[in-house]
Image (tube, rainbow, N blue to C red):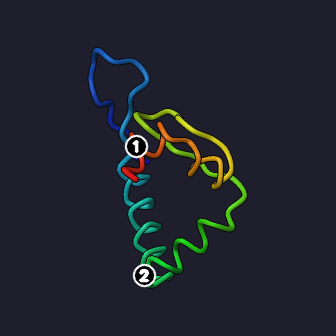
Amino acid sequence: MHIKHTASYEIGQIYVPLANWLLAAATLGAIIGFGTSDALAGAYGISPRVYVMGHGQIVFEGTPSALMNNESIRKEWLEV
């Protein structure tokens, strides 16, 4: 597995090209598999836990309803 260090002055920041390609393939697979945004929204609605990632850190963890009721997360991260 090829690992690239993003900067010589930052410790712990790495780039793994294979991981990026796998995530891209999984995302495209989900988009094509669900077909419509309504179907994807339905899957989101039955999910037991939701995580919002920002800048490499989890900025929210909870249920879908708690996420939609969190005004700051909705405005900053979901643009709703």
Residue in the image at 56% along x and 42% along y: 70
- Report which residue position mark 1 lands on: 75
What kind of element bears circle 2? helix
Residue 2 sits above or below residue 39 on the image:
above
Question: What amino acid type should be assigned to the residue bearing mark 1?
Answer: Lys
Front-lying residue, 21 or 66 = 66
Q: Is residue 59 left or right of residue 47?
A: left
Q: Residue at x 67, y 63 (%)?
A: 47
Image location of residue 45, percent across then percent down? 63, 66
Dot in front, 2 or 1: 1
Q: Nearer the viewer, residue 30 or 77?
A: 77
Which residue is pictured at 44% across the width and 48% down the height?
1
Relative height, residue 39 to residue 12 (above, below): below
* Kind of element beneath mark 1: helix
Do the CB atoms of the residues marked 2 and 1 lie less than 8 Å apart? Answer: no
Q: 37 or 22, which lies in front? A: 37
Residue at point 40%, 43% (across, down) = 75
**9 sits to left or right of 2:** left
Residue 34 is situated, as x and y percent measured from the top left of the image, at 50, 81
Point out which mark residue 61 bears: none
Percent coordinates x, y for residue 31 in the rendering: 43, 75
Compared with residue 11, is residue 24 higher up or lower down, i.e. above or below?
A: below
For marks 2 and 1, give the CA distance: 27 Å
The quadrant where residue 2 appears: top left
Does label 2 or label 1 sit earlier along the sequence?
2
In the orientation shown, which residue stands out farthest toward the right? 48
Q: Characterize the local packing of mark 1: few (<14), some (14-19) or many (20 or more) Cα atoms within 10 angstroms.
A: few
Residue 23 percent location from the top left of the image: 44, 59
Name the kind of residue labelled 2 in the image: Ile
Q: Nearer the viewer, residue 47 or 65?
A: 65
Residue topped by disc 2: 32
